[in-house]
Image: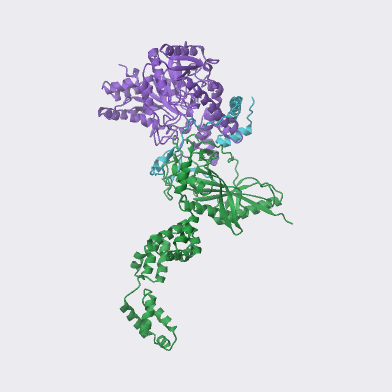
Chain colours: A cyan, B purple, C green
């Protein structure tokens, strides 16, 4: 296996992705990610030095909306699924100490 | 008279002739669900009361002449990754276990406008990540042809529900084969439209540049009618395109002069012998009907899977960031501060396969790896698109298998993700290139499992696909349904 | 000899655009709504929602690029910037990294030591975040997404500034440009213009840049000035002590007059940018750029030239009045309404500037309407009120934009033009002040001043002083 994923990397990716893996999951993730990256490394066999990356399949351009207010007050609906609500706002854990 | 045996179009016609009512149809489907769900688990949510009430409403509109379309009054099922206003939409994930959307997907709205009746929301792989419908947080769906086998995925619930006659048709979504492969495993028709044909508004995104909603139906004629109903240019989806949508006009039995390419690469190592035989037999049927069929080299097929997984995982890692326990969905009970809440809620809410792809996606986008993985994959995507462009300069359609094998047994696939991913080898490049493709049943193997034929068209060439698929289907004759033999057990 | 240090500063300026709707949805951008009343599935990151670009945002961004001599990127895209925070509903911000809409511009600034060119590295479009309110009673924060999705442009300068003075001059210039373009009101206090300061120090003459820090939370020019000076000192102290400067983001605390590092293990600065698959690329044609250029409103330099030609007012007044787009607008509209440019300029130059200064306000905060100022000028000209009453009314108008006509009628402040009444009052004043009358008659001209004052007092200030003078002389 060419790609060795170490504990540090798993920890770091966990911070980026906001995932906390159990010890068992971590070991599995290290193996899985290593294998997947080896597999993706196969792309290296292709010479793409002259190729433009393609983010969108079609050449559709310039899709806009006009600057016109179309939405009214939908606060009630927006808050309907909130795990925590107070005074018309979403409740989150304290963002700074 | 067994209503459940009818196709969607047959049912709608009968309703129009007043031979049956929408309420009869709804009751028949709901009864079928009641008797079969314990075995197949096609649905996550069944909206019994809502459907019965809505049925009367639709019947009134049909009676008054307000609803005249070919799908008016037909009970349908919707994959649970499409938002439905007021009805639980889970993406088969614990993280959305209590999520009730405040708006409906454009595709669902379009079908409701056409008078179709939504019965419920179908099971799927969690967030559409998987090929077996086993990654669902709500239990796996079983293949109606063999309860010990998977229905395929990720739209496994939708395909199984159509096969098990628990609805007349269903919507699925296809990011790497998620409509075509379960359709193939379940012996029904599934079509992935050209990217941009069906609005993605309301579809809970997996890989935004690859996702496309499409029909899963009993036959090609139904498929064309459903596609015609759901295709629309939606101003709410920037990637939605204005195009022709008169798909039903392509339902003609004629492939004379049509040029069909069969990629040699699709028939090599890894392809099951019986599948190969059935697909080549289907090619012969089209040849006999007057099509020019020949082999050619479609290179790069082996690079499609790694490119796909880099791109889909990257997009998924970003698309799934919004599930954070603040605005909706699961929030952990105990945590210590903001980041702990994020981590605990997400780790509890997401299943293993979803976590695996989020981790991979975050990694390939992270500082220092972006160029080597993500950007490289986008370049390979460009090469794959180019290879298809070249193929379509010579051929009207490309013909091949949908999957290397028929439906595997339950629990066989998840142990080895790479092996599972390899099962997508014939479907994935279609998504990378934004192409339309259909899966049509073309045989049954020695295990009694359906085999699917795939026809791939150039962008916006759904009509050619439908025409060829329809011609093939007519020549093939009636394809059995699984439930008939299993019912009496 | 102590080492000499040079400060190197670059700015990232975020400006809220004054569009009617948000950048990717049809929600209003209006200030002051109850929390979450200007929200929809798109700007709250609901599953299944998708963004569609507001065309006006793009045209405003291009207009700013043209006004700052940028090259417009004719093939441009949006990217996602991924980071978790509760004010960021999708946990990614739609922004531009790889192909920002404008690049390589410049802005000329003037300081005491002369003029200088500050390079603009790029201008990109992005969405604003929501607002977090910290609940004092419970251990939680509350999230309001009304501001989420309000369009922003981020103007990134080159590290061309060397002092707080240059930073302020640059910001003033940007602000004026944006206000003249009509794309933003640029209020620092309200957050519609925000500046992050990237600062490093190096030994004078050094070629290489030092390690920089990024300072956030700067809500006024004063705070920016203090933060720049404080951070310069902090970095020099570290270097002098032989310590290393850490590249980091710091938050300015204006109350304490110091900054602190915003470091946390959970805030890895790795944004995993990639092209947003939900938005299609933008192609800007040459014709479109020309159109936007042609639509560009009159900028300050053009206005100054025109004022000089059209109005007979001092150049100094022109400089001051055009230093604020809002003030220039008031001036022009008032002039159109009352036909008295000189009077209009005077009210702005004297009373308005005085009141602004006294109240610690900026010209952008002027609330009275040109209609009311024109009325006030008209009333004074027609001698309906005298100048001291006019000043009194103006002060009220400055505060609450009252209609001067209605106000003086309500309060009975009209000058009394009834000569008989005035004559009777003066006769009474003369009768009551024999000493002053005597003084005047014996040649002490100044004594008449006292009598005028007494008359005005008796008339409750509503007499016209000229007429009082005339009648007094007559009767004496």
- Residue nearest the viewer, comparing C16 with B124: C16
Quadrant, the C terminus of chain C = bottom left
Seen in the picture, residue A14 relative to C249 is either above or below; the reply is above
In this rendering, would B79 be left or right of B419? left
Seen in the picture, residue B6 relative to B373 is either above or below; the reply is above
Q: Position of residue B100 (x, y in %)?
A: 41, 34
Seen in the picture, residue C322 relative to B216 is either above or below; the reply is below
In this rendering, would C13 be left or right of C208? left
Residue B23 visible in rendering: yes
Which residue is found at the position 25% from the left and 27% from the top? Answer: B63
- Residue nearest the viewer, comparing B62 with C453: C453
Residue that lies at the very extreme toward the front in this rendered image: C309
Q: Position of residue B38 (x, y in %)?
A: 41, 21
Which residue is found at the position 50% from the left and 56% from the top? Answer: C301
Q: Position of residue C154 (x, y in %)?
A: 53, 46
Residue B37 visible in rendering: no
Q: Residue C25 appears in which quarter of the rendering?
A: top left
Quadrant, the N terminus of chain C = bottom right
- Residue nearest the viewer, comparing B252 with B313: B252
Seen in the picture, residue C456 relative to B466 is either above or below; the reply is below
Residue that lies at the very extreme toward the right in this rendered image: C1
């Amino acid at each position: 296996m060419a790609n060795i994923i170490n504990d540090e990397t798993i920890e770091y990716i966990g911070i980026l992705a906001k995932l906390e893996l159990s010890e068992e999951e971590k070991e599995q993730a290290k193996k899985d990610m290593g294998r997947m990256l080896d597999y993706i490394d196969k792309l290296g066999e292709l010479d793409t030095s002259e190729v433009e990356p393609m983010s969108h399949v079609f050449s559709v351009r310039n899709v806009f909306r006009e600057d016109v207010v179309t939405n009214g007050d939908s606060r009630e609906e927006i808050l309907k699924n909130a795990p925590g609500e107070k005074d018309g706002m979403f409740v989150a854990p304290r963002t700074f100490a | 008279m067994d209503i459940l045996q009818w196709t969607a179009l047959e049912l709608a016609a009968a309703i129009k002739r007043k031979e049956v009512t929408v309420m009869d149809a709804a009751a028949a489907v709901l009864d079928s669900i009641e008797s079969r769900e314990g075995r197949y688990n096609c649905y996550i949510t069944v909206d019994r009361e809502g459907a019965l009430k809505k049925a009367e409403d639709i019947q009134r509109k049909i009676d008054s002449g307000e609803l005249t379309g070919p799908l008016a009054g037909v009970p349908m099922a919707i994959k649970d990754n499409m938002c439905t206003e007021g009805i639980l939409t889970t993406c088969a994930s614990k993280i959305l276990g209590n999520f009730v959307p405040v708006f409906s997907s454009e595709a669902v709205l379009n079908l409701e406008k056409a008078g179709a009746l939504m019965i419920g929301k179908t099971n799927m792989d969690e967030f559409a990540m998987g090929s077996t419908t086993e990654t669902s947080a709500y239990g796996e769906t079983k293949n109606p042809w063999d309860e010990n086998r998977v229905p395929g995925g990720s739209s496994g619930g939708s395909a199984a529900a159509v096969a098990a006659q628990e609805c007349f048709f269903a919507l699925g979504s296809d990011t790497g084969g998620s409509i075509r492969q379960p359709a193939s495993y379940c012996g029904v028709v599934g079509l992935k439209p050209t990217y941009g044909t069906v609005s993605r508004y309301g579809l809970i995104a997996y890989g935004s540049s690859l996702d496309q909603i499409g029909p899963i139906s009993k036959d090609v004629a139904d498929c064309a009618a459903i596609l015609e109903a759901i295709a629309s240019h939606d101003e709410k989806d920037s990637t939605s395109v204005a195009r022709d949508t008169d798909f039903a006009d392509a339902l003609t039995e004629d492939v004379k002069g049509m040029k069909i390419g069969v990629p040699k690469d699709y028939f090599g190592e890894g392809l099951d012998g019986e599948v190969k035989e059935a697909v080549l037999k289907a090619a012969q049927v089209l040849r006999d009907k007057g099509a020019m069929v020949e082999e050619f080299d479609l290179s790069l097929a082996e690079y499609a899977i790694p490119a796909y997984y880099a791109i889909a995982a990257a997009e998924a890692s970003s698309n799934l960031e919004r599930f954070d326990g603040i605005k909706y969905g699961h929030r952990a009970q105990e945590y210590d501060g903001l980041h702990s809440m994020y981590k605990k809620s997400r780790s509890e809410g997401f299943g293993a396969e979803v976590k695996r792809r989020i981790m991979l996606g975050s990694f390939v986008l992270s500082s220092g790896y972006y160029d080597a993985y993500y950007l490289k994959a986008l370049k390979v995507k460009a090469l794959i698109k180019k290879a298809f462009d070249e193929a379509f300069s010579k051929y009207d359609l490309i013909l091949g298998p949908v999957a290397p094998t028929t439906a595997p047994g339950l629990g066989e696939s998840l142990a080895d993700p790479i092996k599972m991913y390899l099962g997508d080898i014939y479907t994935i490049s279609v998504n990378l290139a934004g192409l339309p493709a259909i899966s049509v049943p073309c045989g049954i193997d020695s295990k009694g499992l359906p085999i699917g034929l795939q026809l791939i068209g150039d962008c916006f060439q759904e009509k050619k696909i439908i025409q060829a698929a329809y011609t093939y289907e007519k020549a093939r004759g009636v394809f059995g349904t699984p439930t008939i033999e299993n019912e009496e057990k | 000899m102590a080492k000499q240090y040079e400060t190197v500063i670059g700015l990232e300026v975020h400006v809220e655009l004054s569009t009617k709707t948000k950048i990717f949805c049809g929600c209003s951008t209006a200030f002051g709504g109850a929390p979450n009343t200007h929200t929809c599935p798109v700007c709250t990151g609901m599953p299944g929602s998708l963004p569609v670009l507001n065309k006006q945002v793009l045209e405003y961004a291009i207009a700013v690029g043209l006004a700052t001599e940028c090259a417009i990127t004719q093939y441009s895209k949006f990217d996602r910037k991924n980071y978790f925070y509760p004010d960021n509903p999708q946990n990614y911000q739609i922004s531009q990294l790889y192909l920002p809409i404008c690049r390589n511009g410049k802005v000329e600034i003037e300081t005491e030591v002369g003029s200088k060119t500050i390079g603009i590295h790029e201008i990109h479009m992005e969405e604003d975040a929501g607002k977090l309110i910290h609940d004092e009673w419970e251990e939680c924060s509350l999230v309001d997404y009304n501001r989420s999705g309000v369009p922003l442009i981020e103007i990134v300068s080159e590290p061309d500034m060397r002092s707080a003075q240059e930073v302020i001059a640059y910001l003033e210039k940007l602000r004026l440009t944006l206000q003249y373009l009509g794309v933003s009101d640029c209020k620092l206090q309200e957050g519609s213009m925000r500046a992050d300061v990237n600062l490093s120090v190096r030994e004078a003459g050094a070629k290489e840049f030092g390690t920089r820090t990024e300072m956030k939370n700067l809500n006024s020019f004063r705070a920016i000035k203090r933060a720049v000076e404080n951070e310069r000192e902090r970095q020099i102290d570290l270097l002098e002590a032989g310590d290393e400067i850490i590249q980091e983001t710091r938050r300015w605390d204006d109350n304490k007059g110091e900054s602190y590092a915003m470091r946390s293990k959970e805030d890895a600065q790795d944004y995993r940018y990639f092209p947003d698959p939900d938005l299609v690329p933008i192609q800007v044609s040459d014709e479109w750029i020309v159109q936007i250029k042609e639509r560009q409103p009159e900028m300050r330099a053009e206005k100054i030239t025109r004022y000089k030609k059209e109005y007979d007012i001092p150049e100094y007044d022109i400089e001051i009045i055009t230093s604020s787009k809002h003030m220039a607008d008031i001036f022009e509209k008032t002039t159109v309404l009352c036909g008295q440019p000189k009077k209009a300029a005077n009210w702005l130059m004297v009373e308005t500037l005085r009141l602004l200064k006294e109240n610690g306000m900026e010209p952008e905060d002027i609330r009275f309407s040109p209609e009311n100022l024109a009325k006030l000028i008209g009333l004074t000209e027609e001698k309906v009120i005298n100048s001291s009453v006019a000043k009194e009314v103006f002060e009220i108008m400055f505060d609450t934009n009252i209609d001067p006509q209605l106000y003086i009628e309500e309060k009975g402040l009209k000058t009394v033009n009834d000569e008989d009444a005035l004559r009777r009052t003066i006769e009474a004043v003369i009768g009551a002040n024999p000493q002053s009358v005597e003084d005047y008659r014996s040649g002490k001209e100044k004594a008449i001043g006292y009598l005028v004052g007494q008359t005005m007092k008796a008339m409750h200030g509503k007499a016209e002083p000229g007429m009082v003078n005339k009648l007094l002389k007559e009767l004496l």
